[in-house]
Image: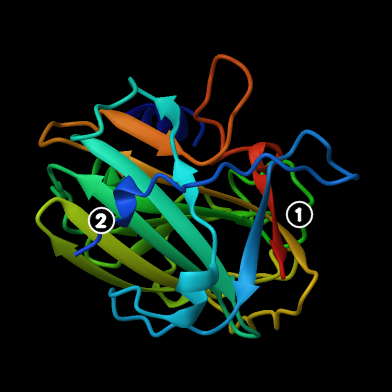
Amino acid sequence: MIAHRFSLLAATLLSCFACQNPNASNATNSTEANPDKPVFTALYGTPILDGSAADDVWEQADWYPLDQVWLGEKPDSNDFSGQYKLAWDENNLYILAVITDDSLTDTHPDGLEAYWDDDCLEVFLDEDSSGGDHQYNFNAFAYHIALDGKVVDIGPDSTFRFFDNHCLTRRITRDKISTWEVAVRIYDGNQYALDEENIPKLLSAGKTMGFALAYCDNDQSPERENFIGSVVVPGKDKNVGWINADVFGQLVLK
């Protein structure tokens, strides 16, 4: 999300050398049902969330790049570069993201004010891969994970809300490199209700979900300079993932 999102909402009331890993791969395959969508795969395994990435499942999983400019200009690799891996077990989807960022910025400590203008990791999830609008509903989620681990998305009432119990995050930063490990609970958005007890879905091999990952990059300025994603978004306006799940890729649990 960008500062542009805030105005839209008001008017209508997203030691690790691995980041330089030359083996980072693009998700270029597609499914028969959706031939134009990139396909990501998650391997079965349960990593320890400690920000170290020292787990067997991460050793075996493929790297995917964060390299699509959704907002701003393509950053220099010294300013920003990123890649990630995916894993799963019955209870969670796991994300390992290794981000090189020369400046980490968090100037909105309350978490609900212009959170997209701070450095954050954004996880887009569509549990049933149905696509479509999710701006003010739970057809899909767009979790903004702040540097302090707070998780924010927009509710059906058009307000910003915390969803901290949806994503458990551990981040370790050394010099310019941050290693994020995130465990994401998966919810059926068609059944999800605010301020009620919601039961996460149990995952199984073969399940397909809509998925994308992105990073908001701010270099000590009032607004973020760049928004870098994991999928190619067609059209002139690339910053539509927070509204339209059609632009997500497909995630297959292996």
Query: Residue 98: horizontal and vertical position, in percent?
Result: 33, 56
Q: Is residue 214 above or below residue 74?
A: below
Query: For the point 74% across and 41% down, which residue is it?
Result: 132
The answer, for residue 203, to whether it is visible in the render is yes
Q: Is residue 69 left or right of residue 179?
A: right
Badge 2 local density, few (<14 within 10 Å), some, or many (20+)? few
The answer, for residue 186, to whether it is visible in the render is no
- Marker disc for residue 17: 2
Q: Is residue 27 left or right of residue 81?
A: right
Image-quadrant location for residue 86? bottom right
Whole-Å distance between the Cαs marked 1 and 2?
33 Å
Foreground disc of the pair 1, 2: 2
Query: For the point 57% across and 41% down, which residue is it?
Result: 26
Q: Is residue 187 left or right of residue 4?
A: right
Query: Farthest right residue?
Result: 32
Query: Residue 130: horizontal and vertical position, in percent?
Result: 79, 51
Give the residue type that dot 2 points to: Phe
The residue at which mark 1 appears reads as: 129
Give the residue type that dot 1 points to: Ser
Q: Is residue 86 left or right of residue 203?
A: left
